[in-house]
Every structure is written in C-alpha cells, then in structure tokens.
Image (spheres, helix red, strand yellow):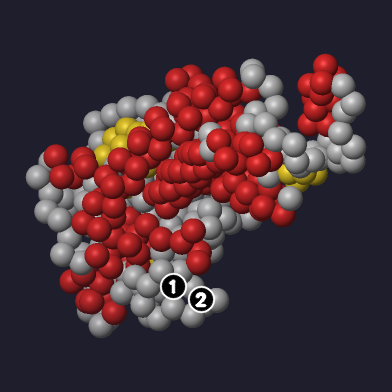
C-alpha cells in the first residue's frame, strides 16, 4: 500500500527522461463542393452579387446570339421558294407572310451565323474558365522562398539539406485577415477572402478575382465579347444601309427572292435591343482592353501601382506570366511571338517547374520536393482530379484553393 502512490510518480519521471515527442496538433476542416477555401473541391465564389452578374453575362450573350442568328440574318441572307406571283393585290401580303417562313439561307447566311456563334461560344467558355479557375490564392502551407545563399551552401555540401524543405522565416509577412503567409505581390481580396498572387481587381462580371492564375481567361473573355459587339453592329449597319436604298427596293420589289427588311414589325425592338447592348458593352470592353494592355506590358497591376510599385522594364515578363512560355508543340522560338494558344480559352498557360516558385513568390515545404538540378525548390501537386481549378497544366502554376485534394501536414481529416 505504501508503494502504490510512488508508481505514478516513477512512471512520470521515466517518460520525461525518454523525451517522447509531443503529438502533432490535429485539425478537421469541412470540404465543400464549391467555394474559395483552400480545401474546397471546385473553385467558385458563392457571392450572390457575383453569381447574379455572371448569369446576366451569359443571358446577354445568348440574347445577342438569338438576335443576330434568328432575327437579323435570316430575312437578309436567304431566298424564298416563290414560284408564281399572287393573283390578287389583297392576297399579296398574306402570301408573302407565308413565304417568309420558308427561308433558305444562302452561303453567306450560314457563314455569318456560324462565325457569330463561334465567337459567342469562345466568349462564354473564356468567362467560365475565368470564373471557375483559382486566380492564384496563397495556400495555407505557403512559406517564404529559401535564401539563395543557403541553397548554394546546401548544394556545395556546406549546409544542411533540410534548409530547402524548411526555408528561413526571415521577413515572413502574415496577412492579418486570412492568417497565412503573404508574398510580395499578393493582395487580400475581401470577397474571395484569400490572398491572391498578382491580383489586379475583383471583377463582379466574372465573379472572381483577376490574378496570375486566370488573367489569360479574363483577357480572352473581354476580347471575344468586344468582337461580338463589333460584329453585330457591323451587320446591323450593313443590313439597314442596303434596306434604305430606294433603287435597291424598287429593283427587288417584284423579284421572287425579295424579302423586306424585317419579317415582323416587332422584330425592330429586338434589333434596337441588340444595338443598345452592342454599343454599351462594346465601349466597356474596349476600355478594359486598353487598360489591361497597359497592365500586361508593364507587368504591374493597378494595386501595385497605387502602392508605389515600379513598372517592369521587360515586356517579356508580363506577356509570359499571362500567356505562358512556348510549348513543345508550338514552333515559336520567341516567348513574345504571337501563338495560336494565346487565343484559345482551352489552352492553359504553362511554365517550367523550375520557375514556378519564383513567379508565385512562395514555396510549399509540406508538398515540396527538392530537385538539385534546379535553382529553386519545386512543388508537386495532385493532378488526378478531373477539374483544373488552381492547376494550369502539369507544368502550370499550382494555386492554393479549390485544388482537389491538396492538404498540409497539420490537417489529417477532411469531412
């Protein structure tokens, strides 16, 4: 009975002498299907205003497609199957109305409808990728880049190799809002609630931030939207310029292929709506393209410029960060030479793994693998997921949100 009280004390002292390491703190996070958290499956901002603006954007594109392909072009670039003229003047309008419903599009009718539909599809696809792609959110396990002197010492055998896996914490800035490491070119977005690398602005029309991860998709969206606006305005002007010619009207008045300017008077409202939409958004997208041209050429976002940043002297850096470097399947030898993949919203901007960390401004020690043949630490990501949110290809930039299974070591369970 006298020895039992001393047993727990003896065990306690013995365990302290063994220096048993403390257990790593565990955390459980909830992984949603859509969101902007670092552990959500798909990147999508659930802001109500942004979702409403994105829906309006798709609706406006669909309306423009309907007005051009079904209201403007068919009465203009088509023929009718009229083989004999009406016998009575009172029956002429009724027969013409019946014949107008039997349009046969000409070659140019099919050409303009197909081309306008392709431009609209490209604009919508670019918008979808701009909205559902990680713009460059900083992951929770991001850490400052290793000191170049420490890397050189480790390569020469004078230092510890672990310095490449656990870089120095000198000069580490912590965002006071999202509590993660904030690289030099990162800025916090209050809507996405994440720090975004090379953030230019938060666009409600694409319901996402415009950053290093989706800048190309945003540029393609406004570019193809501008082309659809100019194209539709050109068709409207050409149509009514030909329609208002008196000589042309008298010449074709009794021709069997003659069709009036509009099939129905109510279609005039559709054309007026198309003109208003094309003018307003044509002016808006043209101003945005001029503005973004300055951003790409100077490699300096508006936020960085407001904070007193200096413009880059090299245009190669700005173009390369937006459109990526030349791929093996391209024949271009210059990084600034125009390539076909610049205009494709389905082609991802890709970069060599050796420069990813330098572009992003951080490394990921928990997922990083040091390659002694490179000048910096490279990271490996899980690309087995079918989505491409946050991953710009096998050699693309690896973002830190909506990444389909990327987790840090301090998180052991995702529910």
Residue visible at 42% across and 52% down in the picture: 216
Q: Quadrant of residue 181?
A: top left
Q: Which mark is residue 330?
A: 2
Q: Secondary structure at mark 2?
A: loop
Percent position of residue 79, x then y = 77, 43
Q: Is residue 313 above or below residue 113?
A: below
Q: Is residue 226 left or right of residue 160?
A: right
Q: Are marks 1 and 2 in contact (CB under 8 Å)?
A: yes
Residue labelled with disc 1: 326
Percent position of residue 35, x then y = 51, 31
Percent position of residue 413, x then y = 57, 37
Distance, label 1 to label 2, CA atoms, is: 6 Å
Report whether residue 206 is seen.
Answer: yes
Local crowd size for mark 2, using a 10 Å CA cut-off: few (<14), some (14–19), many (≥20) = few
Q: Is residue 40 left or right of residue 90?
A: left
Residue visible at 28% across and 47% down in the picture: 290
Q: Is residue 370 above or below residue 96?
A: below
Percent position of residue 252, x then y = 69, 40
Residue visible at 87% across and 28% down in the picture: 86
Taking depth in this image into account, of 356 and 87 the one nearest to the observer is 87
Taking depth in this image into account, of 349 and 137 the one nearest to the observer is 349
Taking depth in this image into account, of 405 and 286 the one nearest to the observer is 286
Q: If the image is split into quadrants, where does the C terminus sit?
A: top right
Q: Secondary structure at mark 1?
A: loop
Report whether residue 400 is seen.
Answer: no
Residue visible at 67% across and 52% down in the picture: 108
């Amino acid at each position: 009975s006298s020895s039992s009280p001393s047993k727990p004390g003896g065990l306690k002292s013995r365990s302290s002498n063994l220096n048993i390491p403390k257990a790593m703190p565990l955390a459980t996070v909830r992984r949603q299907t859509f969101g902007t958290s670092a552990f959500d499956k798909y990147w999508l901002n659930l802001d109500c205003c942004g979702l409403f603006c994105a829906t309006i954007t798709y609706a406006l594109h669909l309306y423009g497609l309907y007005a051009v392909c079904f209201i403007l072009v068919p009465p203009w670039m088509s023929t009718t199957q009229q083989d004999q003229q009406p016998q009575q003047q009172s029956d002429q309008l009724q027969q013409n109305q019946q014949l107008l419903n039997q349009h046969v599009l000409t070659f140019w009718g099919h050409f303009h409808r197909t081309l306008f539909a392709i431009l609209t599809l490209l604009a919508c696809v670019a918008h979808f990728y701009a909205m559902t792609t990680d713009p460059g959110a900083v992951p929770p396990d991001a850490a400052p880049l290793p000191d170049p002197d420490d890397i050189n010492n480790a390569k020469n055998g004078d230092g510890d190799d672990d310095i490449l896996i656990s870089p120095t914490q000198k000069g580490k800035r912590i965002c006071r809002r999202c509590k993660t490491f904030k690289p030099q070119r990162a800025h916090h977005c209050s809507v996405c609630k994440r720090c975004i690398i090379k953030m230019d602005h938060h666009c409600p029309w694409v319901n996402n931030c415009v950053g290093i991860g989706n800048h190309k998709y945003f540029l393609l969206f406004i570019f193809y939207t501008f082309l659809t606006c100019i194209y539709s305005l050109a068709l409207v002007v050409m149509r009514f310029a030909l329609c208002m010619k008196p000589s042309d009207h008298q010449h074709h008045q009794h021709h069997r292929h003659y069709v009036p300017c509009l099939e129905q008077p109510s279609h005039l409202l559709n054309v007026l709506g198309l003109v208003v939409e094309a003018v307003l958004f044509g002016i808006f997208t043209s101003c945005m393209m001029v503005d973004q041209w300055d951003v790409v050429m100077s490699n300096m976002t508006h936020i960085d410029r407001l904070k007193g940043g200096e413009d880059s002297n090299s245009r190669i850096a700005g173009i390369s960060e937006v459109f990526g470097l030349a791929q093996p399947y391209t024949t271009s030898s210059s990084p600034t030479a125009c390539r076909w993949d610049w205009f494709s919203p389905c082609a991802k901007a890709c970069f060599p793994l050796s420069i990813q960390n330098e572009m992003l401004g951080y490394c990921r020690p928990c997922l990083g693998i040091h390659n002694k043949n490179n000048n910096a630490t490279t990271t490996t990501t899980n690309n087995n997921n079918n989505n491409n949110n946050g991953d710009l290809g096998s050699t693309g930039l690896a973002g830190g949100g909506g990444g389909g299974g990327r987790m840090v070591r301090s998180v052991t369970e995702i529910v």
